[in-house]
Image (cartoon, rainbow, N blue to C red):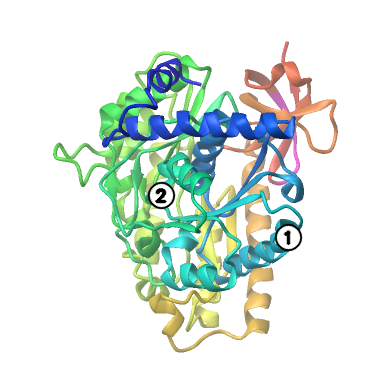
Amino acid sequence: MDTTIENMINSIDLSAPVPEYEPMRQYYYLKACRKIVKEKSEALNRPLTAVVSTFGCQMNARDSEKLLGILKDIGYQESDDEENADFVIYNTCTVRENANLRVYGRLGQLKKVKRANVEMIIAMCGCMMQEPEVVEKIKTSYKFVDIVFGTFNIFKLAELMYMCFTGDEQVIDIWDSTKEVVEELPTSRKYPFKSGVNIMFGCNNFCTYCIVPYVRGREKSREPKEIIREIERLVSDGVKEVMLLGQNVNSYGKTLDDNVTFAELLREIAKIDGLERIRFMTPHPKDLSDELIEAIRDNSKICNHIHLPLQSGSSRLLKLMNRQYTKEHYLELVDKIRNTIPDISITTDIIVGFPGETEEDFEDTLDVVRKAKYDSAYTFIYSKRTGTPAAKMDGQVSEDIVKDRFNRLLATVSEVSHEHIKRYEGMDMDVLVEDIDDHDNTFVTGRMTNNILVHFKGDKELIGSIVNVHLDECKGFYYMGTKND
């Protein structure tokens, strides 16, 4: 843990009144929970275990690192065994309704487990909890859930746990919004050599298919100096790569008094000594500026990759989606990016079956895929999301037509991407090694600056290092390579 945070927690006097301001208030509860967990562990003669189960996007994954960091700090050991854990928390996603159904299914299984282990604590947080009907359902149908909180007060986990430890009622704490950003808390990173960093929260775009603005709130940008300070701490702790996170990073800075642009923030972050790679997710095409394209071109630390969500190639559907750009504007932007940074990797998101989608609309999407030459694409079948304007639109597309179009899209993306990605074959490229290969433990796997995966012979000693690799053969969406001596 960050020694500064640890020193602050240790300095807390539990006999004094609870501090009113953050993060000192949470430090108080961290220390108080440490005492309770230690006593419980000693009584059971074993360590307490915790499972953090994450649903959804990179923002949720980053939040889960914070939740796990708090749990570890107060004395829990990380586990993946939900049935035997002492504390289980679901960090939920609500982008699609079937995500909600998955969570309810998992909760139903836990209900049986908790009957046999009444000491188990179950917590729910994240985007689902920002929906009033979900919270009401948990109150009435899932009374065995102990703690419920949302997206705006993730940082309060220790305080809510203390309330649970010392009370006998369900703890429910949902905020509609907040101006507070509390980041100076323990975090447990999945990878010691790379980390996500929130640069902003919320979204102002209101795409008609998306629930995010309703559950994550309006845009709020963090101050640049706070972001720089956090990344400097991460680098001093061994981090080589950061992923800057926001629902629309291109609009970063608009809520700040100084109106710092995202490109200006990138250039400042690139000055941090010891930081080797900078990624970001997700930019919105309507806000992608020439200044940002030039910043990527001019600085080798900023990774050679832009994820540029398309969603649909039909200008008519894009208007219905409230995306605020046309097919023509999108393709002009792709051309501008490629003309400025010829070797850049562009990836995208595409939705099939949006209400009213015709065969002509779908053909427009395939046309953009062929012209944009994506290195890869995340493809989704439209899922009606209650609470969004699109859910009420006429022209919901039949399942058999959607499945046929989805399969045709996958085939087109595969054909185009496989051909385009082969351009690196035979080159020598730097690869940040991330892990042992899932299929062969004599191989390691990592990513090039363009985000393309590479597998090559190596051992765990290489994990976290940047290695120069010869790209022997393209295998579609990844490469097989050989480490250069």
Question: What's the residue at 72%, 15% (across, down)?
Answer: 484
Disc 1: CA contacts within 10 A as few (<14), some (14-19) or many (>=20): few
Q: Is residue 188 above or below residue 460?
A: below
SS assignment at label 2: helix
Q: Is residue 474 magenta?
A: yes
Q: How many marks?
A: 2
Residue 424: percent from left, percent from top:
64, 34
Gap between marks 1 and 2 measured at Cα: 60 Å
Foreground: disc 1 or disc 2 = 1
SS assignment at label 1: helix
- The C terminus lies in which quarter of the figure? top right
Question: What's the residue at 73%, 52% (across, down)?
Answer: 117
Q: Nearer the viewer, residue 239 or 105?
A: 105
Residue 463: percent from left, percent from top:
68, 22
Residue marked by disc 2: 335
Q: Quadrant of residue 80?
A: top right
Is residue 297 rendered to the left or right of residue 47? Answer: left
Question: What's the residue at 40%, 29% (across, down)?
Answer: 27
Residue 480: percent from left, percent from top:
76, 33
- The residue type indicated by label 1 comes to Arg
Where does the magenta region start and end?
470-476
Q: Is residue 467 above or below residue 201?
A: above
User: Magenta-highlighted stretch: main secondary structure?
Assistant: strand
Disc 2: CA contacts within 10 A as few (<14), some (14-19) or many (>=20): some
Residue marked by disc 1: 115
- The residue type indicated by label 2 comes to Asp
